Image (cartoon, helix red, strand yellow):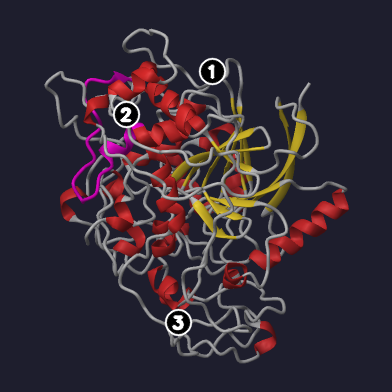
């Protein structure tokens, strides 16, 4: 018999951490439940300083410091373990430091551009960003300082992340994304959604609401739960085990008209100030890719019939950790020599049974439906937070393992896919001569089970040899922060409206600020406080990313490469 894990799910955060935690603690007390984990579905806005504000993708008039920096400095501590995915309004430079995931503050964990972690018996996947067809097939070409279109494109999901997620073979309990899966509205109260959001009608009628990437992943992974945000509306749906989100071939997306906004005027909600998924830079679309159809990846780069990835192609350079990486309650072996391995090395670790050459296991649980829940953003009288009990099969007693853990299969996938990580604006070429998953996703081949099992054998031998491995609490503050007491509303002169919140009581983000400096009662808010700290033009390598890469024997391509 299993047990229940109590989770809380929050829609868009928009820097309102204090309010979210206060609401959660009150709700938890009223329900008589102790919440084990909080999941936030994007637009978290982990803003530490003015550099982060400058890199955030939204019009300058909406840029405010917010209260996250107090958690970053340790002035405040998250009362509940918190994980989140990235949205389209994030500090891109900060998120790029933690591409593979990591702690942005004590007890607050970012899941990376894509990722899988474990918590208390739950297996949780995450996908950050939103879908834009003109950036989907590109690599990670953005270079600091992040200006112009790069501030937006950093939050546009890439085909490489979908390719990694498509390699998952073991069932997931939860997937968290910012964007909705495309066509998910057909499996819930569509008319009720349109009554609340009539400006969605055209996209729904044209089958364009939501992300085709997330629809594809939902078809492939079919977790028990899928949580999203982005649309600023609560919505429930259920996709049955035999249902498909998109019948037949994936539809093309209409060519982008560079003289029009990607969100039409008819889609704007006149009842609130909408940040939406546009920034002040989204007008820029490269003409060469303006009409690319949805999910139309280029053909494999190597079509000679030879396997695109062999074990001998991996680096055989030894990579010692140089120090004991054990931390409190981390079951990672001491003095482990993490290294990439050649086929000869793998032959000596746990043997992998012979399997059909092209077998690809299905991660779906037979007969299981997926329950979808989207939530609003944190504002008064909005449905932005819910508490849910989820049954798990893990029978570990008490709260012994209510901590974040590494997932062995995901670490193996990171190693397996790493040689294909695209680092420029050229299209991502998936490996050739691998198994095609389905006619629905011809451009997303899967490595055979046997290849993944060999990487899993390496991971178990080198990382999990003593059992579960908890994600170490190795957060280290690296960026300069404002002095204590700096108001949340400060924009360091970036905002177009230098006078602070409107004097009628509506705050700078379109909501009521309470007593936290967001436009209450017409008080003057000092938005133009000068910033005396450095404004670096490079990404600072984060030691968390370095430690993970060293553990897996891969390179930190995004912060260690020469720009």
Q: Nearer the viewer, mark 3 or mark 2?
A: 2
Asked if 435 appears above or below 96 in the picture, the reply is above
Q: CA distance from mark 2 to mark 1?
A: 21 Å
Q: CA distance from mark 3 to mark 2?
A: 42 Å
Residue 166 visible in the snapshot:
yes
Residue 212 visible in the snapshot:
no
Report if residue 436 lies within the magenta region: yes
Q: Which mark is residue 495?
A: 3
Indicate which disc, 3 or 1, sits on the residue closer to the N terminus.
1
Name the residue nearer the viewer: 254 or 361.
361
Asked if 456 appears above or below 103 in the picture, the reply is above
Instruction: Please state, as top left, top right, bottom left or bottom right, where the C terminus lies in the image.
Output: bottom left
Answer yes or no: do the residues labelled 3 and 2 have beta carbons within 8 Å? no
Residue name at image x 54 percent, y 66 percent: 270
Q: Position of residue 151 (x, y in %)?
A: 34, 64
- Kindly indicate the quadrant of the structure image that contains residue 54: bottom left
The residue carrying mark 1 is: 242
- Label 2 element class: loop
Crowd class of label 3 (few under 14; some 14 to 19; many from 20; radius 10 Å): some
- Kindly indicate the quadrant of the structure image that contains residue 352: top left
Q: Nearer the viewer, mark 3 or mark 1?
A: 3
Q: What range is drawn magenta here?
A: 416-437
Report if residue 57 lies within the magenta region: no
The residue carrying mark 2 is: 444
């Amino acid at each position: 018999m299993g047990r229940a894990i109590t989770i809380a799910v929050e829609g868009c955060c928009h820097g309102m951490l204090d309010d979210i935690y206060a609401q959660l603690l009150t709700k938890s007390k009223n329900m008589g439940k102790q919440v084990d984990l909080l999941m936030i579905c994007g637009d978290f806005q982990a803003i530490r300083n003015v550099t982060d504000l400058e890199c955030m993708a939204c019009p300058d008039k909406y840029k405010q410091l917010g209260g996250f920096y107090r958690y970053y400095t340790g002035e405040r501590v998250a009362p509940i373990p918190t994980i989140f995915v990235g949205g389209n309004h994030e500090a891109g430079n900060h998120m790029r430091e933690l591409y593979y995931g990591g702690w942005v503050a004590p007890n607050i964990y970012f899941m990376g551009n894509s990722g899988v972690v474990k918590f208390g018996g739950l297996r949780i996947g995450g996908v950050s960003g939103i879908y834009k067809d003109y950036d989907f097939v590109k690599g990670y070409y953005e270079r600091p300082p992040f200006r112009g279109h790069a501030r937006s494109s950093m939050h546009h999901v890439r085909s490489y992340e979908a390719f990694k997620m498509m390699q998952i073979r073991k069932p997931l309990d939860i997937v968290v994304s910012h964007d909705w899966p495309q066509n998910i509205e057909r499996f819930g109260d569509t008319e009720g959604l349109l009554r609340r959001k009539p400006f969605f009608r055209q996209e729904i009628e044209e089958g364009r609401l939501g992300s085709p990437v997330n629809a594809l992943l939902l078809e492939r992974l079919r977790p028990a739960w899928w949580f999203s945000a982005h649309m600023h509306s609560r919505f429930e749906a259920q996709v049955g085990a035999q249902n498909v989100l998109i019948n037949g071939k994936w539809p093309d997306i209409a060519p982008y008209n560079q003289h029009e906004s990607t969100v039409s005027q008819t889609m704007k909600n006149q009842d609130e100030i909408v940040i939406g998924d546009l920034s002040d830079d989204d007008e820029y679309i490269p003409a060469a890719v303006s009409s690319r159809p949805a999910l139309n990846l280029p053909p494999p780069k190597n079509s000679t019939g030879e396997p695109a990835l062999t074990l001998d192609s991996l680096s055989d350079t030894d990579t010692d950790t140089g120090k004991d990486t054990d931390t409190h309650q981390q079951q990672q072996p001491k003095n482990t020599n993490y290294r990439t391995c050649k086929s000869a090395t793998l032959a000596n670790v746990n043997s992998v049974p012979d399997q059909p050459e092209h077998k690809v296991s299905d991660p779906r649980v037979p007969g299981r439906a997926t329950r979808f829940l989207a939530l609003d953003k944190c504002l008064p009288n909005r449905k932005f937070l819910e508490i849910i009990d989820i049954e798990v099969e893990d029978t570990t007693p008490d709260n012994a393992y209510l901590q974040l853990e590494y997932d062995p299969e995901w670490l193996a996938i990171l190693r397996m896919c790493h040689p294909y990580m695209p680092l420029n604006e050229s299209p991502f070429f998936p490996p050739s001569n691998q198994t095609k998953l389905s006619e629905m996703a011809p451009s997303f081949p899967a490595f055979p089970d046997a290849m993944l099992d060999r990487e899993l054998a390496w991971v178990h031998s080198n990382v999990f040899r003593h059992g579960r491995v908890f994600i170490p609490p190795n957060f280290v503050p690296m960026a300069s922060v404002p002095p204590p007491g700096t108001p949340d509303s400060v924009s360091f002169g970036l905002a177009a409206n230098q006078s602070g919140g409107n004097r009628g009581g509506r705050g700078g983000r379109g909501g009521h600020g309470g007593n936290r400096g967001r436009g209450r009662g017409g008080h003057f808010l000092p938005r133009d406080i000068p910033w005396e700290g450095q404004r670096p033009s490079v990404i600072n390598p984060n030691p968390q990313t370095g430690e993970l890469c060293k553990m897996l024997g891969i390179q930190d391509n995004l912060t260690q490469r020469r720009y």
